[in-house]
Image (cartoon, rainbow, N blue to C red):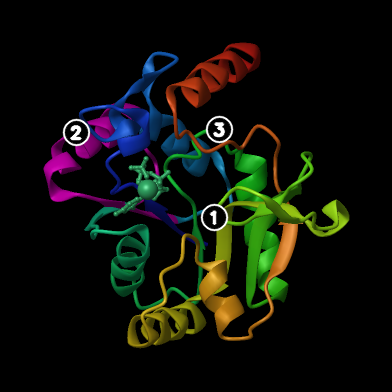
Amino acid sequence: MYLLIPAAGSGRRMGSDRNKLLLTLHNQPLLAWTLLAADAATEITWIGVIGQPYDFEDFQRIINELAITKPVELIPGGKTRQISVSNGLESLPPTAARVLIHDGARCLATPHLFNNCAQALQTCQGLIAAIPVKDTIKIVDQEHFILDTPDRSQLWAAQTPQGFEVELLRACHRRGRQEGWEVTDDAALLEKCDIPVKIVPGEETNLKITTSMDLAIANFILSQRH
Ligand code: CTP
Ligand code: MG
């Protein structure tokens, strides 16, 4: 299974002056944890890391120091995650029929989760890891008055990995560009094209590192693991 890791962000909400994936978490750069899990996942055979070219030197050093056993390619990212993934899709080897996409910022995903998603993708066109929402969610208007309380049993929080047939995802990205759709994950493009996407069980610890509080929680989770 081919794996693309979007890692071309800037970490604006972290308030850091560099890509948050280069920040240190439990003695390793964030990106290193993502790469180690991907390298340990037996189903993954090829890794593409999508980054801004100014980060490539640091990325390459991390890859070398970890002695990643699988082929790793660095792919230039774009201004948005959507463009970064689209660039990644164009850089896949021609033999890639299916692909998993996993945000570098979800650096606590386990090899087990990668393997599960890769296996489940053999029997469907598109899938995402997700977990049931624990909070009661409110839909509010612009003045912050509640409009509705959706039934929680139908609400799931989307994670990555997200997996797709490569040609299908390429076609959905093309359509998204033509129609000007702006989305924050790849499943949303398939949804807009009326293509079914399956949910597979994610992991509660597979959090996305967005703020410094997430970094503190991730630090704690890793200290419990090691
Ligand atoms: N990403 C990307 N290309 C972009 C923007 C984001 O590849 N132009 C990646 C990030 O590196 C991250 C993932 O997409 O691994 C999810 O994005 P997010 O958590 O929003 O990271 P950032 O965009 O870096 O953070 P922020 O939005 O706070 O600036
Ligand atoms: Mg972002």
Q: Is residue 194 above or below residue 81?
A: below
User: Which element is circle 2 on?
Assistant: helix
- In the image: residue 140, left or right of residue 8: right
Residue 106, given in percent of the width and then of the height, sits at 50, 39
Q: Is residue 62 magenta?
A: yes
Q: CA distance from mark 2 to mark 3?
A: 20 Å
Q: Earlier in the sequence, mark 2 or mark 3?
A: 2
User: Which element is circle 3 on?
Assistant: loop
User: Is the C-beta separation of discs 2 and 3 under 8 Å?
Assistant: no
- In the image: residue 135, left or right of residue 102: right
Q: Which mark is residue 108?
A: 3
- Which quarter of the rendering shows the C terminus? top right
Q: Which mark is residue 142?
A: 1
Q: Is residue 68 above or below residue 178?
A: above
User: From this viewpoint, is residue 111 visible?
Assistant: yes
Residue range (magenta): 46-71
Q: Earlier in the sequence, mark 1 or mark 3?
A: 3
Crowding at mark 2 (Cα within 10 Å: few <14, some 14-19, many 20+): few
Q: Residue at x 39, y 86 (%)?
A: 179
- In the image: residue 125, left or right of residue 182: right
User: Which element is circle 1 on?
Assistant: loop
For mark 2, what is the residue? 58
User: From this viewpoint, is residue 70 visible?
Assistant: no
Q: Amino acid at mark 1?
A: Gln
| Foreground residue among 128 and 141 | 141
Q: CA distance from mark 1 to mark 3?
A: 35 Å
Ligand 1 closer than 8 Å to label 3 CB: no
